[in-house]
Image: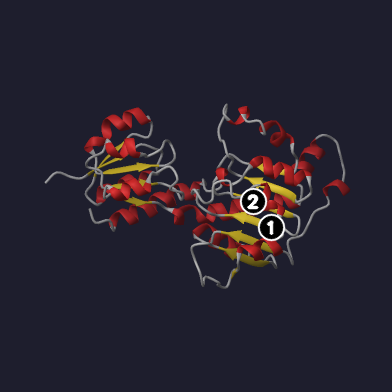
Amino acid sequence: MSKKQILIVDDLHPVFKQEAEALGYAVTDEPLFTREQTLAAIKDYEGLAVRTKFQVDREMIDAAPRLKFIARAGAGMDNVDEAYAKEKGITCINAPEGNADAVAEHTIGMLLSLMNHLRQADQQVRQGIWDREANRAWELKGRTFGIIGYGYMGQALAQKLQGFGLDVIAYDKYKTGFSDTYAREVSMEEIVKFSDVLSLHIPLTRETRQLVNHEYLFHFRKPIFLLNTSRGEIVQTEAILKAIEEGKILGAGLDVLEVEKFPALSEQSWYPSLKVNNKVLLSPHVAGWTFESYRKISEVLAAKLKNLEI
């Protein structure tokens, strides 16, 4: 009996290939494959492993009559048509467990940098400016930290916030009864009413797209620090900039944006204002991309592959 075959078309840690081969799969590792090359080759494979290189949509799925599973090396599944895959009897697996710690640490790092003006202070000192008052910081202790989405990422963040002396509250539309040692389950109304810090850890869906807009931010009772390490399309960037201007947002840490990568990002109408705003801290979608998570994601996928029944 011939071995079942897996096609890797993205940059995965070698441990995934090693573990898959140990399970009896024949693995073709082509991390530089384009979408077109993948469409041409996928007909021969039972498995596809990908990160975020391209959309695994109906066209891709229809080109793969033998496909039994799609392994997404990361947390979000927004680049995979899960509903159509399920309709075709294809199992989808991902690895949010693999980069939860990385995302949580990055989130806290962005918040501390914003509250302590670390980027501004560093730049000023390098420019010969010694301005203590302009860099007066805020402390975290005693504040209310609101988390939206209490999956692997939200839980890892809540755990790491222990020791800061915070009241950590969390809202998750799809979970109930999840209060634990680290966070207290609340309604969205309570998130809006009490939060001093708001951190987003939800997938991109039709419901969450543009969730954080002008109307949403209008209802917050207190000025907040806003952090987004989930998906850029969840947040309307123009609304963030307007809320900063109005004093409703004290600082925003954005690892993800509505439009990512250049030159597309530089072509957005809001980008010139975003890049000069010293109350916004930006990073290039790397919150979950550490040296450690690179391996852990592949280890998690390999473990889930072992339990697949195909």
N-terminal of the pair, mark 1 or mark 2, is 1
Disc 1 to disc 2: CB gap under 8 Å: yes
Which residue is disc 1 drawn over?
197
Amino acid type at image mark 2:
Leu
Question: Do we see residue 171 in this rendering?
Answer: yes
Amino acid type at image mark 1:
Val
Q: Which mark is residue 247?
A: none
Q: Seen in the image, is 26 located left or right of residue 124?
A: left
Q: Position of residue 134 (x, y in %)?
A: 85, 46
Q: Quadrant of residue 37?
A: top left
Q: Seen in the image, is 246 located left or right of residue 94?
A: right
Q: Residue at x 49, y 62 (%)?
A: 174
Which residue is disc 2 drawn over?
227
Q: Seen in the image, is 185 located left or right of residue 68?
A: right
Q: Position of residue 233 (x, y in %)?
A: 56, 43
Find the distance from the CA under tag 1 to the CA under tag 2: 8 Å
Viewer-side residue, 206 vs 89: 206
